[in-house]
Image (cartoon, grey):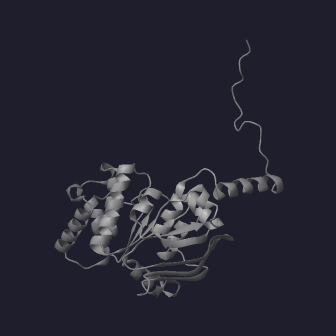
Amino acid sequence: MASPVISCRGVAKRFDGRTVLDGVNLDVHAGETMVIMGGSGSGKSTLLRLIIGSFLPDEGEVLLLGQNLSRLSPDGRDSLRRRFGILFQSGALFNSMTLFENVALPIQEHTDLDANIIDIQVRIKLELVGLLEHADKYPSQISGGMKKRAGLARALALDPEILFYDEPSAGLDPVTSAQIDRLILDLTKKLGVTSVVVTHEMDSAFAIADRMAMLDKGRMLRVDERAFFDRLRLATDTDALAMNSDERLIRQFLRGDAEGPITDRRDQSLLERQLFGGGTVSTEPSLVPTRVPRKN
């Protein structure tokens, strides 16, 4: 088997003494769509930033397209970044530029192509995401879903080998979210790019993933085929009794159940803080009224 295009080995990251990622291992292979999921604070956004070189690991190593990011100079990391594209959660478009100008910017900055060639390249990228007819509009003139698609066109500007998506469905209605999912699938198939998608939207995750990775409190619980996670999601309560603790936790997350190991852990943590950390549950109102009730 060919070497993975992304390889994380024993990756740890700490901020102010707090461990955010702890011994994470992950391989992503060429041409696949890997979905990284987990709850808020699980470390998935930090892992994404480590993979793209915004952070460097405190322990372990991250190899991107065969290169160890920790051993590259800042210029070397900048050069490597031209080989991948990122769709940020907000789209991150420049509001003072038209969609055409937003997509053209990375090509103008990083190539010596003639203006006529850039014009053709931009129009191709906008057509790929269905926005060519809106090329002269500004971000303030288009919907949230169109902003995501425009951001994706800009991520494609330099013909990347890898596309990273940071919560691509966040803030979108179900229909628009489904359209973004289909676009991700179409682009992966047409362009042969490798896709890494960070999300906690389960409908999107199961629609687009080839493989999935589940993070919890900085620990990688499981990396497996989509079918494995689908079996956990559809497992009955009786089936769950035979699962180990990690599998039960993943199952609760995938199903969005109100009860399970995730919520049990939170309840236990609250109890421990109240008993041993000095925290108490106040019976007083959180706001003190400023108006005194009138006496009759």
Spot occupied by residue 189 in the image (x, y as percentages of width and height): 30, 71
Q: Residue at x 16, y 72 (%)?
A: 116
- Which quadrant holds the N terminus? bottom left
Spot occupied by residue 129 in the image (x, y as percentages of width and height): 27, 62
Can residue 59 be seen here? yes
Q: Residue at x 69, y 25 (%)?
A: 291
Question: For this rendering, which residue is in front, 42 or 120?
Answer: 42
Spot occupied by residue 165 in the image (x, y as percentages of width and height): 42, 66
* Residue 252 in the figure: left or right of residue 181: right
Question: For this rendering, which residue is in front, 62 or 27?
Answer: 27
Question: For this rendering, which residue is in front, 88 or 176?
Answer: 176
Q: Is residue 24 above or below residue 239?
A: below
Q: Residue at x 69, y 71 (%)?
A: 17
Circle count: 0
Spot occupied by residue 180 in the image (x, y as percentages of width and height): 35, 58
Can residue 108 be seen here? no
- Which quadrant holds the C terminus? top right
* Residue 120 in the figure: left or right of residue 174: left
Q: Looking at the image, which residue sits at the far top?
A: 296
Q: Quadrant of residue 109?
A: bottom left
* Residue 98 in the figure: left or right of residue 21: left
Q: Quadrant of residue 155?
A: bottom left
* Residue 72 in the figure: left or right of residue 185: right
Q: Looking at the image, which residue sits at the far front?
A: 238
Q: Is residue 113 above or below residue 260?
A: below
Q: Quadrant of residue 160?
A: bottom left
